[in-house]
Amino acid sequence: MHATIEVHGLRKRFGQTVALDGMSFTVSPGHVTGFVGPNGAGKSTTMRVILGLDAADEGTALVGGRPYRSLRTPLRHVGALLDAAALQPSRTARNHLLWLAHSQGLPAGRVDEVLDQVGLRSAARRRAGGFSLGMRQRLGIAAALLGDPPVLMLDEPVNGLDPEGIVWIRGFLRSLAAQGRAVLVSSHLMSELQDTADHLVVVGRGRVVADTSVADLIAAASRDRVRLRTTARERATTALSQAGATVAVADRDVITVSGLAAERVVAALTAGAVPFSEVAADRATLEEAYLELTRNAVEFRAADAEAGR
Amino acid sequence: MSAGTAPRRGGFGRLLRAEWTKFRTVRGWVLGLAVAPLVIVTLGLVSASGSHTSCGGPYDVCPAVPVGPGGEAVDDKFYFVHKPLTGDGSITARVSSMTGHIRKPDVTPGVRNEVDGVVPWAKAGVIVKDGTRQGSTYAATMVTGGHGVRMQYDFTGDMAGRPGGVSKDSPRWLRLTRSGEELTGYESADGRHWTVVGTARLAGLPDTVQVGLFVASPGDLTVQQADFGGSIQAVRFTEAIAVFDQVALEGRTSGGAWERDDIGVTLEPDGAPHHPGGFAQSGDTYTVTGVGDIGPTGEGQRIESTLSGLPAGLIVVIVAAVMFVTAEYRRGLIRTSLLAGPRRGRVLAAKATVIGTVTFVAGLAAAGIAVVVGTRILRSNGNPVLPVSTLTELRVIAGVAALLAVAAVLAFALGALFRNSAAAVTVAVAVIVVPHVLATTSVLPLGAAQWLLRLTPAAGFAVQQSIPEYPHVLAYYAPSAGYYPLAPWAGLSVLCAYAALALGLAVVRIRRRDA
């Protein structure tokens, strides 16, 4: 069993709406992969196709090299959290996990282990209907961990968590990946994944827009912009324009230079005897990089959002 | 990570266990299936306690209903002209006339309106019987008012001979021979050429029996459709008069005179017989007048009358079974179930098995208590309860449990199809409970009621019928009287077919649709 998710050429329509338009990516073990894109980009649909809940019109989705529906005890291969609210309110947390354990031939002792892991032991015998959203998320994660699976898929797990819960889940996901599992976490907000994901699959309009490491994505978005602090803004602009750069005013004493590497900026300024106090490579934030990538992909139509739900 | 570890149990066993855990961990569902038997038992016992029969008289004790050799309640009322016969032998007689009187509704109030005629199941012929005790074993060959020559034995046995009645111009010879426990009936149009009507083995027939002539004439049944639904049944007095001659006995019989007994005749308070039969002899010609019938009777309470709470209990079961699946759709939990069991048909099958089994067990307890305790209460209140064999009683109890279980599976499947509690409960009640109520409360014409109980899932209610329909006994065989148009297991099979169909459609739907 390989701890992988392989998605290849998935296409799916809901009536007139194209939900998946050739979605392809691979999730490999050992790190957290962020699955990010605006609402309606096809994240949840992709996850449901991988999990055998929805059927794609075209393409394949394999977990550990096999289609989900061919797995006999699937929760031992893939743990998934799709909708933390999907609980029978009058059933206790422990019993919710117990029937799942029975369905996979897992011993009841495993239920207590995962309850401990997510910190729900004290609430084990309380009815799930009385749980806060954060507790439901923890219970959903416990369910995903029940079969000790090599692959984990979590759809918007941070949604609705309090700050403490967000910190907990970030550390938790990283530790799961560190154990060699493939962890796929979706979100529509890049900021939620900034400190969690090592790798990103960015999607928009049903297809992958970028499949890259976090560092590469930021570098690509930053290109070779340089921030320059100078008291002689006009002289600097003239000198740099002559050297072939594009200059934009960022602040009273700050300009942003693009199209010229930092050392050439310094050389041009020195040659023109322009005074400056600071030259720095301008690093884009992950959020900026993401917004730039998905600018074209964001297409908000109510129908899309509904169909991709 | 345990992905490589093979689970010990089989796939379906794991799903069953998971669904059982799901069921038992939701208090509402467990309560629902505990309420259903409670409703059935409570309603059944309350209605049994409220049912009293009183027969008047100094001790207020109802006469015991005679019971035939097969254990069923019987009518055994006829005029019997007989002699003892020891060992093997035979009786032969010619019937040359069969007439009678039938009382019709009074035209002028207070003036008895009687017409000449015989009812179709009026009987006259030769009989061998173990004494004169009501309910004792017998075999008889007879002519009837409208069903030709018959051979009947031990109340439930009936075999047809040639059709047609008798008259002076076309009399009928009848013969009955005894050889050990075996009785053979013959008939002849001329007294020379005989054909066998049938043979019967009477277990335990003693060496000495009573052999002779008999006449019986069951009451005339009329059923009127009432103006606002329902029916009015009336049974009116009839008598039959048959003329016998050429009577011949073979074997060791007493040489003395014929003995005469008006078996089972009703006595007036002053001790005089009410509607007596009669016997007149003129030379070798005997004229016998008889009232009554020899055959099984459906008069009296039945063990299934203690199951009056069944429709109400069934509704509770339907609601619980529907909720068992629609709750998962409402909460989105069905996706979790399908993640755990991607083979969707098996998930539905496991759920259906759990709800069906749980309902069967609850139904078994409910029907068992209601029937056993309810019948005891009925009897202690003086009600004559028609006796049935233990096997029949077990069939009624287990059958009702199966009816509840299969109805639960049907309701469950409708829930899986509609994914909506209100719609599924409404349809399930409309196809299972409503047709039964319509058919058995006789708001519908008889034919329509019977078709409802053949074609709809309500056919399954037939499984509770303890007293069968007898073609040779005239009665109002209507659902409102507890007679179903299909045999018990056939009726249950109709319900099973609907449940299988609905479950099949639900499986197709859950397989095809995105979850």
Image: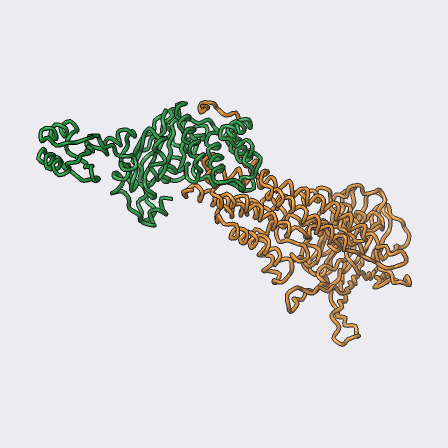
Chain colours: A green, B orange
- Name the spot of residue A72 as percent of width and height, x first: 45, 30
Residue nearest the observer in this picture, A146 or B316 = A146
- Left or right, A207 with reference to B78: left
| Residue at x 83% of width, y 61% of height | B277
B500 displayed left or right of B214: left
What x and y, as percent, mark residue B443?
62, 63
Q: How many marks?
A: 0
Outermost bottom residue:
B108
Viewer-nearest residue: B74 or B179: B74
Viewer-closest of B253 and B378: B378
Give how far across and how far down residue B326 sits, in percent.
51, 46
At a point 50% along the width and 25% down the height, the residue shown is: B7
Q: Quadrant of residue A265?
A: top left
Whether residue B197 is visible: no
Q: Which quarter of the picture shows residue B271?
A: bottom right
User: Seen in the image, is B333 located left or right of residue B46?
Assistant: left
Look at the picture and state if B455 lies above or below B347. Answer: below
The N terminus of chain A lies in quadrant: top left
The C terminus of chain A appears in which quarter of the rendering?
top left
Q: Is residue B101 above or below residue B305?
A: below
Left or right of residue B479: residue B321: left
Using the rendered image of the protein, determine whether residue B371 is visible from the camera's viewpoint: yes
Along the line of sight, which residue is nearer the eye, B333 or A56? B333
Image location (x, y in percent) of residue B337? 48, 37
* B102 to B25, vertically: above or below: below
